[in-house]
Image (cartoon, rainbow, N blue to C red):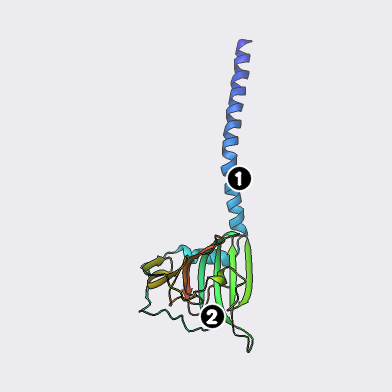
Amino acid sequence: MIGASVRRLCVASSLDVIRALADQLRAPILAGCFVAILSACSTPQYRALNGLVGAPLNPLPRYDALGSTSPLTLSVEQWALYEEHGPFGRVLLTAVLRSGVKGSGWRVELTRRSAGRVQRQLIHFSSTKDPFMRMRSRGVQSSVAKDIVVPAGVFVGSWQEAEAIYHPRVPIYGLLTGRDQQGNHWRLLRFGLDRPPNAR
């Protein structure tokens, strides 16, 4: 009789321990499943871009402004890839220069990618309707920054305006890093003069 009671007590205690362990493990397991689901749902393009920026440039390329603050001459398919933190959390923002229809001037194709979301828009070069488009340099330099290091390289001869740093070797707007008044911020990951890594 006593032995049976002891056995029931041991079984009950063991079940309590198992339940407590299950409760402790539930959150990490669910979080892991959530990450796995997001990874499975992410597009091949997003995974490819993540792979591109996940492989550090070694050694980092060095770009010198050589005393110039003049922006690059515009050409079709110049591009810049940024890490953007904004309303949708962290996204990869690709800005690509496109030619508009005849007489309409230059346009910028902005593509924002996250694990489960893609947003693309084609905007006139001088538009200010997108937060990124409002980050263009206004030519009012508050200070000159010497060597600025971002994942895209080391930039010599950069300049600062308010909460943004620019360099003339970077396509589109020359932005290296920046933060706007709404709390959005950007950091240059890669850039190029043709063949943008923005496959549809």
Q: Is 89 displayed left or right of 139 in the figure?
A: right
- Mark found first going from the N terminus, 2 or 1: 1
Residue 179 position in % (x across, y down): 51, 63
Check disc 1 and give the amino acid type: Leu
Q: Which residue is the site of mark 1? A: 30
Dots 2, 1 in contact, CB < 8 A = no
Q: Is residue 76 left or right of residue 168?
A: right
- Label number found at residue 190: none
Element at label 1: helix
Taking depth in this image into account, of 7 and 20 the one nearest to the observer is 20
Count every numbered label the image shows and give the total. 2
Vertical placement of 96 versus 88: above or below?
below
Query: Where is residue 57, by image quadrant?
Result: bottom left
Amino acid, disc 2: Glu
Q: What is the x, y in percent for residue 164?
A: 47, 67
**The residue tagged with tag 2: helix, strand or loop?**
loop
Q: Position of residue 54 (x, y in %)?
A: 47, 62
Q: Which residue is mark 2?
A: 77
Q: Where in the figure is residue 33, as x and y percent of width and height?
A: 60, 49
